[in-house]
Image (cartoon, grey):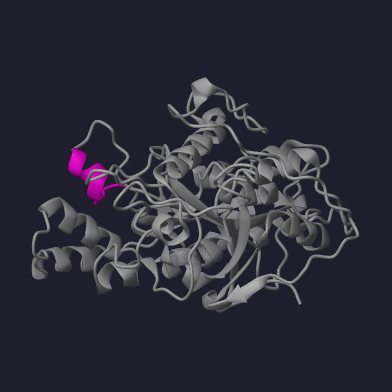
Amino acid sequence: MYKRRRILTFATAGAVICTAGLIPSVSQAAGSGDRGEKGSYAETHGLTADDVKNINALNESALTPEQPGRSPGELPPSASPSSRAPGSTDDRETPPAEPLERMPDAYRAYGGRATTVINNYIRKWQQVYSHRDGKKQQMTEEQREKLSYGCVGVTWVNSGPYPTNKLAFASFDENKYKNDLKNISPRPGETRAEFEGRIAKDSFDEEKGFKRARDVASIMNKALESAHDEGAYIDNLKTGLTNNNDALLYEDSRSNFYSALRNTPSFKERDGGNYDPSKMKAVIYSKHFWSGQDQRGPSDRRKYGDPEAFRPAQGTGLVDMSKDRSIPRSPANAGESWVNFDYGWFGAQTEADADKTVWTHGDHYHAPNSGLGPMHVYESKFRNWSAGYADFDRGTYVITFIPKSWNTAPAKVQQGWP
């Protein structure tokens, strides 16, 4: 899979970005044994501490334009030495163009996951995801540049702008959390911080979080259908929420929920929505990340998770992502190194059974002429996608908007290729 296998220089490492084989969901994994029993992505696939450092540095480089106080950037900034981690190298490359009519080869499929090289994904994208007003489009250099960023690149090239994660949903069982804290004892040698972090992680249910996002997206899409201005969309949205007795109805008018459409760049563009809600559709992607991001908080929470962080609001399921800076888990032991996030693209699939849905993501940024190697793209069934790694203790499901004329979110996705 990679161009080399270097000896790991650390005891335990976590790395993005995909799940391998049939493994339990995040909540199941946390509740059924040692958090690290699966091993890390780095250990499994031969990534070194330098690989992890470079992946994180590139992720941070892409994130820079979206930080508070900065203007959003459609294209990633140049990864200059000053923007990267000390000692890291800028070896990412933009993959070459693929002929529009060239058909993709079959993916390699096993255990609920299909995998392919980035060039073959571009061919599939052009055949399946590229359509604008019914016509296939060749992936542009700008889009290939976005894609080369790895997991976030897959979501980026399909959603348009860099994902800002503002309208995120999750499911947290407050009663389970309180009962488990009261009735379960820490494991031998487990500190209080480790115990609380583990119990909090086990109290999240990704399948319910995903269902919540799908239900809300369905209400939004119905509200968009006949609305030709934002006021009509909001009125339709409130009617739909009322009919479904949905707690989002009582969100403040300034909430991310009500402002999500107007804050979508393509909604304002002439070749996008052109301020006409009926030309837009709500779609979904997912982000896995670490909860302990408060650099001024207790160090144990950065190592073992912050039980209070990024919990969804009871009733609405909304997660306040304003404090998410994509900061990776801090090492608890010498040599540990963790990747900062993982993204998966879902789109607008209509498959009712969550376990049969397909999530597209990537292993790492594209660096074919370095030790890291070329980027691979994965299509995972939900149970594989939601499993995550010890790098992550939160999984959110995010709604964004794309023009209906785009087909980057088809209703049906065929895993791999026949």
Q: How many labels does the image show?
A: 0
Horizontal arrangement in the rendering, residue 180 relative to residue 205 (left or right): left
As rendered, which of 278 and 373 lies closer to the eye?
373
Quadrant of the rendered image containing residue 295: top left
| Residue 236 is a magenta residue | no
Residue beneath the point at 55% across and 46% down: 372
The percent coordinates of residue 130 (x first, y second) are 80, 55
Residue beneath the point at 23% across and 50% down: 304
The percent coordinates of residue 352 (x first, y second) are 58, 77
Q: Quadrant of the C terminus?
A: bottom right
Name above or below for residue 222 compared with residue 322.
Answer: below
- Residue 88 visible in this rendered orientation of the protein: yes
The percent coordinates of residue 339 (x first, y second) are 42, 47
Horizontal arrangement in the rendering, residue 155 relative to residue 206 (left or right): right
Q: In which quarter of the image is the N terminus?
A: bottom right
Quadrant of the rendered image containing residue 95: top right
The percent coordinates of residue 49 (x first, y second) are 40, 43
Name above or below for residue 11 compared with residue 172.
Answer: above
- Residue 245 visible in this rendered orientation of the protein: no
Quadrant of the rendered image containing residue 108: bottom right
As rendered, which of 207 and 88 lies closer to the eye?
88
Residue beneath the point at 53% across and 32% down: 89
Horizontal arrangement in the rendering, residue 89 relative to residue 230 (left or right): left
| The residue stretch that appears in magenta | 299-309
Residue beneath the point at 45% across and 48% down: 341
